[in-house]
Amino acid sequence: MKLLVINPNTSAGMTAQIAAAARAAAAPGTDIVAVQPDFGAPSIEGHFDDAFAAAGVAQQARLHGADADGVVVACFGDPGLDAAREATAAPVIGIAEAAFHAASFLATGFSVVTTMTRTCTIADHLLHKYGFERRCRGVHGTDIPVLDLESMGEALVGRIEAAARTALERDRSGAIVLGCAGMADLALRLQQRLGVPVIDGVAAAVKFAESLAALSLRTSRRGDYAPPLPKPYAGWAAGLSFTAAD
Amino acid sequence: MKLLVINPNTSAGMTAQIAAAARAAAAPGTDIVAVQPDFGAPSIEGHFDDAFAAAGVAQQARLHGADADGVVVACFGDPGLDAAREATAAPVIGIAEAAFHAASFLATGFSVVTTMTRTCTIADHLLHKYGFERRCRGVHGTDIPVLDLESMGEALVGRIEAAARTALERDRSGAIVLGCAGMADLALRLQQRLGVPVIDGVAAAVKFAESLAALSLRTSRRGDYAPPLPKPYAGWAAGLSFTAAD
Amino acid sequence: MKLLVINPNTSAGMTAQIAAAARAAAAPGTDIVAVQPDFGAPSIEGHFDDAFAAAGVAQQARLHGADADGVVVACFGDPGLDAAREATAAPVIGIAEAAFHAASFLATGFSVVTTMTRTCTIADHLLHKYGFERRCRGVHGTDIPVLDLESMGEALVGRIEAAARTALERDRSGAIVLGCAGMADLALRLQQRLGVPVIDGVAAAVKFAESLAALSLRTSRRGDYAPPLPKPYAGWAAGLSFTAAD
Amino acid sequence: MKLLVINPNTSAGMTAQIAAAARAAAAPGTDIVAVQPDFGAPSIEGHFDDAFAAAGVAQQARLHGADADGVVVACFGDPGLDAAREATAAPVIGIAEAAFHAASFLATGFSVVTTMTRTCTIADHLLHKYGFERRCRGVHGTDIPVLDLESMGEALVGRIEAAARTALERDRSGAIVLGCAGMADLALRLQQRLGVPVIDGVAAAVKFAESLAALSLRTSRRGDYAPPLPKPYAGWAAGLSFTAAD
Amino acid sequence: MKLLVINPNTSAGMTAQIAAAARAAAAPGTDIVAVQPDFGAPSIEGHFDDAFAAAGVAQQARLHGADADGVVVACFGDPGLDAAREATAAPVIGIAEAAFHAASFLATGFSVVTTMTRTCTIADHLLHKYGFERRCRGVHGTDIPVLDLESMGEALVGRIEAAARTALERDRSGAIVLGCAGMADLALRLQQRLGVPVIDGVAAAVKFAESLAALSLRTSRRGDYAPPLPKPYAGWAAGLSFTAAD
Amino acid sequence: MKLLVINPNTSAGMTAQIAAAARAAAAPGTDIVAVQPDFGAPSIEGHFDDAFAAAGVAQQARLHGADADGVVVACFGDPGLDAAREATAAPVIGIAEAAFHAASFLATGFSVVTTMTRTCTIADHLLHKYGFERRCRGVHGTDIPVLDLESMGEALVGRIEAAARTALERDRSGAIVLGCAGMADLALRLQQRLGVPVIDGVAAAVKFAESLAALSLRTSRRGDYAPPLPKPYAGWAAGLSFTAAD
C-alpha cells in the first residue's frame, strides 16, 4: 500500500520529520512517500500562509495522487483537504480531522494544544466544520513558532506539557490533541507524563488512511468531490488542469 | 491483537454473522472474539430493546474486556458504549460511530439506510451526540425487520438498494451508511451497484479499533470514563461490581 | 390518580426518601407508588451504573406501568426514559428533564449543582438532547457521593450551598437545579438561603406528570414510542417481552 | 390560587373563550381571572400586531399581576413574556412554550399546526429561543384567520385535521401542537380523530402555572428578570412605571 | 435620501444625540429625521422597558416610515425591528444588528461592551437570533445607567475602556461593539486608545441603510414582512391600523 | 476612495464584467480597480479550482492591497478572504458574505440560486461559517457553467428565474441571493420579475466596503488577522513574503 504524505509547507526538514513519524505509525506493508509543494511558506502560521499551502496540497495531490492508496495532508489546518479529495479518488485524511476523530473515540471531551495563538481560530473553524465543536473543550496556543519544534529540547517539551496540564484541568478534558505536525515525536512521551491519551494527527491519519484503503473505501466521486471539471489552468498551474481524459 | 466484538442482542446467528464480517475486515494478526449477553432481546428495534442491550454490553465488556486490545459494540444504536468505556481501558468503538466517522472522511454529506423506521430516532440522536448532524443528510427506514437480514435474498437487497438510490438523490449525498450490523455482508455489493462508498460499521469499527490499539491509544481514565466506583451490585448484576482491587 | 415513581438504583433507603419527596409534592388525590429494580447499583454515579439503571427502569415500567396514570424516573441521569415511554402509554417524566423545564420557566439562565463531577458529562448530554444547552449556563460537581446525601448534615448542605453561590455568580444564572434525587429535601431550604428559585426534579416531575394526566395527554404511540415489537426476550428479562396481545 | 390569564389581543370574545378553556383545565381551587389590553389589535397575525400585544401584556401584568399566583400569556407568539416576568414575581407561562414543553414530554418529535402562514416565522423564532428547534419537525400554516376560529365549524375543523395528518406524515412526528389560543376547544376532538397527543397551549400553561405555584417556585428576581428599574414612563404608559417603593 | 432614525426611548436629549451621530455618519445627500415615541420609558434597560419601546418603534415607523428611504432603529436591543419591517417597505436596520454585521467583516471574534449587566441577556438573544453567537465571544455589562452616558466624562470613558480591554484579553477578540446608542460619540476615541476596530451601531446602521437604498433593495413584502393585515386597532393605537387601502 | 476588486479566476472577460458591475454600484467618488491572479482556473466550480483562487486572491491582495481603501473578493465562494484580511489593513468583503448580510436585513429567510450544483456544498459551508445557516433556507444549483453567464441570453435568464421561483415557494423565502459574480447584471431584472429583493453580491460588497471605509473601520490587526509573520516564501510566491519592514 502506498500512502502519499503531503507536507503543506516548504520546509524539507519538516517533511523528513513528518515522513519519519508516518513510517513509525505505518503497518509493515505500507510505503510512505512524503512530498512538499515547490512554493509557499516554510511554516503555516496564519491564513495567508494557509492559502499558499492549500494550493500546494492541491498541486501535490494532482501530481502524485493518482497511484496512491491513500493521502495524508500533514498540517494541522488541513489546508487543501477538499481540493485534494477532488484531485484523487484515494481516501484523503487531514491530520487535524484524524486527531479529532481519534480523540473523540477515547474521551467525551478533549483539548487541543497548538503553536501560535493566532492559529487557534483556524482550529476553531475546523472543529466547527467537522462537527467536533462540542467534543473539543478548548484550543490553547503556546506561541511556540512552528520551526522551533524541529529541535525539541526539554524546555519546549516542558512548555507544551504545562499547557496540556492547564488545559486538562480548566477544560475538564480527558485527552490532548497535539495541534501541529511538528509535535509528532512528542505524543508518547507526553502520554506517559500526563496519564491521558495524547494524540498526534500524523500517526492517526496514517492509520485511518490504511483502514479505509483496506476496506476498499475511496473518496466519493458523486457531488462536490467529483473530479474537477476539465478546463485550462493559467500560469504556474497550467500543468495541473484536468481534461476530459482524466 | 485481540478484539472483543460484542453483539448486543441475544441472537447467536447474528453473533456468528457479525464475527464473520469482523474477521473479514481484520488484519492478519487480529483475533476476533465474538460474544453476546445472556439476556435481552434477539434484535434491537427500539428504545426498550436498547435498554436491555446496553446493560448486556456493560455485562460483556466487564466479563471479557480486561484482556482485550480493543472492543467493538456491534449494534447500530451503539448501546452501552459509554458504559463499556468505563468497564475497560481498551479502546471501544461503536459501529454507528465508526460508520459515521468513515463516511465523513469520504463525502461531505452521507445518508443512512436502516431497518425499522422507528429506530431512525435513535440514529438521529447518535448523530447529534457525536456531532455528525450536519454531515448526515438523511436517515431512511426500510421497515425490514432485523432478523430478516440473516437470509439476505435479492428481494431484500433490492429494497435496500432502492432506498439507497432515493436517499442519494433526495439528500444530495455522496455516501451510504448501512444502519444495521446485519447488513455487513451487503456493503461491497451495494458499493458496486451504486458507485458511491457504502460503509458497514462492523468493518469500520474493527479497523479503527486496530488503529487505536496500534498507536497505544486507550480509553481515557480521567473524567467520566474513569473505572466505575467500587460498590456492591444487586441481583443478577452482583458479579459485575467493581472493587477497590480493580 | 396513581403515579409510579421508579428509583433506578437499588437502595431501598433512597426509594423511601424519594417516595416521601414525591408525596410532599403530590396533589391530595394522587397516590404515589415507589419501586426500584431488583438488580444493579445502589447509586448511579457513572455510565456503567447508568446502563444497569436504564434496564432496571425498563423492567419496572414494564412490570408496574400498565395501570399507572403517570410515571416518574427518579434519577438525575433520566436512565431508561425512552424505554419506559415505549413500555407504557402513561406519560413518563424524568427528574432531570422536569427540573430543566421548570427552571427555564423561571429564569433565562440556570445552573446545575450535582454530586460526582464525573456525572457532569451525563447532565451535559441530557441538556443537549433536550435542547436546554443554551439555558443551562453551567454544571457543577461537588464530589459528594450520592449515598452520603441520605443523612444530610449541615456540613453537606453548606458545601452544596457554596457550590450554588459560586455557580450563580460565575454563570450569571438566575436559578439552581439540584442534580440528584437525593437532594430533594434541600430545595426549599436552599431557596430561602439563596433567594433564587431552587428546583428539585422529583417534585417538578410529580407536578408535570399530574398535569399531563389531568389533561388526558399520554405518551404518543406513533413512531419510536410505539409499544415494543413482540418477540421473546432471553435470560432474566424473559418475562418482560411484549407479545401480540399487549 | 389565582391565575391571571392575559389575552394579548383586544377581542373580548376571544378573551371569554380563552377563559373558558383555562377554567376547563384548572384544578378545583384555581380562580381564573382573564383580562385583555385596552389597546392594540383584535388578533395577532404578524410582527406589527405582536409589538402592540407585547406592550399590552406588559400593561396587564403590571396592573393585575401583583397578587396573582401565576400568569398565563394566551397568544401563541408569547408576546411580552419576558416583560411580564419582570413585572411580577409570580411564575409566568406562555402558551407556546407550554405547548412545546408538554409535547416534548410525549413524543421525540412534534409538529405545529397554526393559523396564518406568515406567523410561522414567529413560531420558528420561539422554538429556537426556547431550544425546541430539534424537537419540532415542522410548523404548518393553514391560512385560517384567527377570528374565524371563534365559530369553529366542521369545515374549519376538517382543514386543521387535514393539515395535522399531513404534518404527522411528512415530519415523521408523534404529536401535534395547536398554534393558536383560538384552537383550544379543538384539542380533545382532534386527539380522538388523529390518535396522537394534541396539545392546546392554554390548558398546558394553566397546569404548568399551577404546578410551579404549588411548589413555591416563582420567577427569579436575580438578573434580567429583576423588577424593572424605577423611572418615569411617558404618555399612556405613565401609570405603569416602577418606583423605588415597588 | 431620507433616513428615519427612531430613538425607541422617550428621552429627547438622547434623540438629539443620536441624530447628531447619525448625521456625522451620513453621506452628503442624506437627510436624517429623528423621532421618538410619545410614550414609554426614558431609557431601555430591561425587558419591560423594551416592550413599550417595541410598540413605540412600531408607532413611529407607521407614522413616519411611508416616505423614508431607510429606517434606523436606534436602541441596542433592536426593539420592534420586525414590526417596523412590516410597517414600511423601506429597508429597516437595527443598531445592534448593524454593529454585529460590521464587526464580523473586521474580525473573526468580537466582544460587546454595554451598559446594565441585566441587558446582556437581550444582547445574547439577538446574537443568537441573527446568527452571530459564534462570532461574538462575550457580552460585558458595565452597570453604567444609560442616561449617565449623556454627559460622558473621562471617568465613564475610563470604565468603558477598561471593560473593553478586559474583554479583548479574556475573549481573545479582535474588535469591540459598543452596546448602547448613547455610546456613539465614543467609538473613534476608543478605537484610537485600544488599537482595534470599535463599532458604534448608529453609524453602521446609517451606512448600511444608505447602501441598501442606493441598491434599490427594500424590505421583502413576501412572507412575514408583508404589510400588516387590515383590521381595526383599539385604544391609543387606533390610528395605526392598516386598511385595504394601504 | 479606491476599491480593489479581485476576480479570483483568470478570465479577463469576467474581470471586466465584474468591474462594470462594481462601478455601477459604487458612489461617485469611488475608484474601482479590478484585478485577477496570473494563475489558476478560468472559473471556480469546485474545491480544486477554489484552492488556486484562494492563493490568487492572497497574491493580488498582497500586490495591490496596500493603498486600497477597501477590497472586494468577487467570487461567490469567498476564496482567500481570511488571507486577504491578513495581507492588508483595508476592510475586505467577500461577495457571498455581502449578499448574505444584505439578504438578512431584508427578509427572515432567503434562498440562494447558483451555478453548478456541486458548488452548493461550498455555499453551505460559508453559510455555516458566517452564521447564516438559519437565515438561508435553501441553496439551489442550476448546473449552468459559470462562463456561460458571460452571454446572458433569455433562455439562461429564464432558467435562473424558474429556479428562483421554485426556491421562493419551497423554502418559504422572502429574498433571492444570486450565487455567482457572473450573475451581477441580472439582479434588477429578476427583482422586477419576482417581486422580491434579489441580491447581487458584487454590488452589496462594494457598498459595504465603502461604508466601512467611510466610518474609518479597518480590518483588526489583533489576533488572527494580524499581518503575516515575516518569513521567506519559496517558488513563484517568493515575492509575496512579509518582512519585518512590513
Image (cartoon, coloured by chain):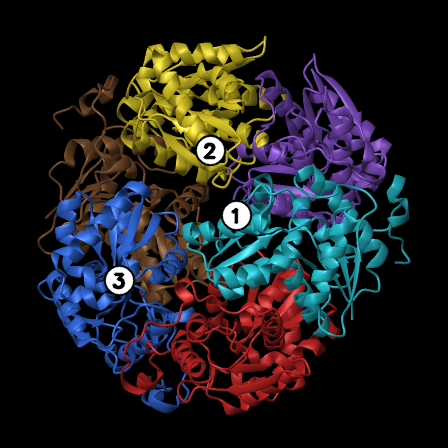
Chain colours: A yellow, B purple, C cyan, D red, E blue, F brown
Respond whether the residues carrying marks 3 and 2 are from the same subunit. no
Q: Which residue is mark 3?
A: E95
Amino acid type, callout 3 = Ile
Foreground: disc 3 or disc 2: 2
The residue at the point 16 percent across, 31 percent down is F63
Q: Which residue is mark 1?
A: C139
Amino acid type, callout 1 = Val
Mark 3 Cα-neighbour bin, 10 Å: few <14, some 14–19, many ≥20: many
Q: Position of residue D123 (x, y in %)?
A: 50, 67
The residue at the point 60 percent across, 44 percent down is C122
Foreground: disc 3 or disc 1: 1
Closer to us: D62 or B149:
D62
Mark 1 Cα-neighbour bin, 10 Å: few <14, some 14–19, many ≥20: many
Q: Which residue is mark 2?
A: A169
Q: Is residue A82 above or below residue F197?
A: above
Q: Is residue F114 visible?
A: yes
What is the spatial separation of the Cα atoms under label 2 and label 1, in whole angstroms?
15 Å
The residue at the point 59 percent across, 22 percent down is B212
